[in-house]
Image (cartoon, rainbow, N blue to C red):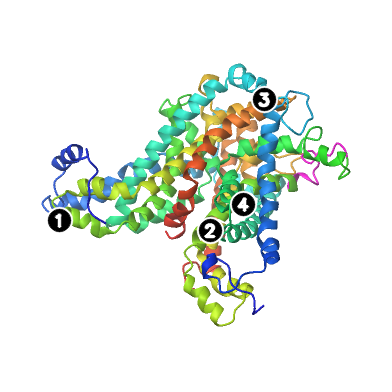
Amino acid sequence: MPLTRPPGREEASSAVALAVPNHNRGPRLRRALAPYALIAPTILLLATFLVFPVGSVVYYALQHHVVNEPYDDAFVGLDNFSRMFGDSQFWGSLAFSAKWVATEVALQLLLGLALALIVNETFVGRAVARALVFSPWAVSGVLTTSIWMLLYNPATGVFHYLSEVGIGSQGTSVLGNPDTVFGAAVVAELWRGVPFFAILILADLQSVPRELYEAASMDGAGRVRSFFHVTLPHLRDAIVLATLLRSVWEFNNVDLLYTLTNGGPAGATTSLPLYVAQLARKSYDFGYGSALTTAAFVILLFCSILYLRLSKFGGEK
Amino acid sequence: MTTSTITIATPRTARPKATPRQGRVLRLFLPLALYLVFTVVPFYWMLLFALRPAGSTSLLPWPLTFEHFDTVWNGMGFQVFFRNSVWIALLTLVFVTFFALMGGYALARFRFRGQKAFMLALLCTQFVPGAMMLIPLFNIFQTFDLINSRWSLIIAETTFQLPLAMILMSGFVRNVPVELEESAMVDGCGRIRAFLAVVLPLLRPGIVAVGSFAFIGSWNNFLFALMFLNDPELQTVPVGLQTTIGENTVDFGALAAGGVVAAVPVVLVFAFVQKYLVQGMSAGAVKG
């Protein structure tokens, strides 16, 4: 690669070069400080708007802090946490969150893996197929909600049209029925979640050395065997990381459930973050809400470490 | 099983024997077609409701009408929401990309004390429940008098997107051979000049990927806008979209037209960066 400078850059870059001396001529101290200067804005942002808020959540968790009862603010120690253990709504929302994360991540992984394997093959129209099946990735929670509300609407949605041709019954309201609302929400979230997995797995799939397949083929391995003995081991780290990140995101994600079901009907889809949001919005109980947040953070951290240990992430393949 | 050949990741020319066409249809095209239906039907449904007259039950958007777009764009304030969203997303893009470039370069090209800890901190941010940071963030923005200011959104979005963007960008910088910079510096360039002249042009795919992730993420954010902005004149598209749902009687045409308005910019960005997407994911997030 020749070191060609794009034309017209000379003036600008020489001005910069004047301001900052050449690295091997400049003072050693400046060179030692350079990386810190480069990450300083990030550290400042993260410290102010992420680390400090996390700290204040822990602080609030130990307080009685209800916004519309400002005179009752007091240090209460672990009272909020002992209240948590007796709160059936907390356990209910935690159980829902666990079910939600497990279902979503398992299905997204299986479908995403299948999709990645399919669009990794060579066929006419592959680029178009990729663009189409990946496109929901770009779509937000609220937009996903809007689209699926149109689809699920009993009067004008797809089920209405299906019932007209004899599939299913008239007037089915999948979002209003506690038995079907979970499945309906899962499908809507899958729609935008599977592409993420597929993109991530496809990225890793393209780095599998072709020689491995040729060698496997020489040894008489069929397609299925080489998938399990070559592809899957190669993808292991990507899959572990993708499932971990996705689990955390699915656990923390509020926008879809908030707008699609708002936790209902009758609390059937209230996840833990949604419960906390309701506590903050309806009863202004920031102290108890913060205690639940702290608990959620600890649970996430514990599960993540356990998962990384059990999956031997980054170990020998 | 032993007679079948391997087709995974193998181009057509490298295949020893032609795969039976039927197997390929069953294995490849049938599942792909099913998944395409699952992906495309919801988009089509939204377009259908946005383009056909209210009360119509036709499965084709015919006769075509733009009344719903007129309703949301001029009547429901989407014109304003759209402008707000564009500004917020563009500024987030600029900040995330710029800081990610700086930090990503530092992580890839320097060894410094605290580097491991910093990397670990970046990864740990992914476990922080963003939705649960709303209460303390609200208090902080109130202190800085940024509630009801678009800067609250830009700052919050930049903060939450920066860690992953930086990890991604450091992967891209690592992919540029360090020798290129070194030879430029031997030729008399300073580090910054070498970076601008040699590394930056080669980083273009990475910058496009990181920038578009930032734009799409910021464009789609709902909770921050809901919490930190009250003035309807400052609201963004996702919140505007939510208000079309929030009423007791849902105007499906308006909901769908609002959805199209919300989808068009991100889908355009997506179409533009689609080819960098897979590359972007493999450069940083997975290989770390």
The chain carrying label 3 is B
- Looking at the picture, which amino acid does disc 3 mark? Ala
* Quadrant in which residue A102 is drawn: bottom right
In this figure, what is the number of numbered marks?
4
At 22% across and 52% down in the image, what residue appears? A3
* Quarter of the picture holding the C terminus of chain B: bottom left
Q: In which quarter of the image is residue A256?
A: top right
Label 4 vs 2, first from the N-terminus:
4
Give residue B186's mark: 1
The kind of residue on which mark 4 rests is: Val
Q: Which chain carries label 4?
A: A
Can you give x and y, in whole percent of width and height, for residue A47 in the image? Answer: 38, 43
**Distance between the Cα atoms at labels 4 and 3?**
28 Å
Q: What element carries label 2?
A: helix
Q: Give the residue pinned by disc 3.
A: B254
* Magenta span dominant secondary structure: loop
Residue A175 sits inside the magenta stretch: yes
| Outermost residue to the left | A25
Tell me: B11 left or right of A86. left
In contact (CB < 8 Å): disc 4 and disc 3: no
Same-chain status of marks 4 and 3? no
SS for dot 4: helix
Instruction: Check if mark 1 and mark 3 are on a common chain.
Output: yes
Residue B49 drawn at (x, y percent)? 71, 30
How far is mark 1 from mark 2, CA to CA? 39 Å
Which is more toward the observer, A79 or B101? B101
Please tell me which residue is depicted at 54% across the width and 21% down the height of the picture: B79
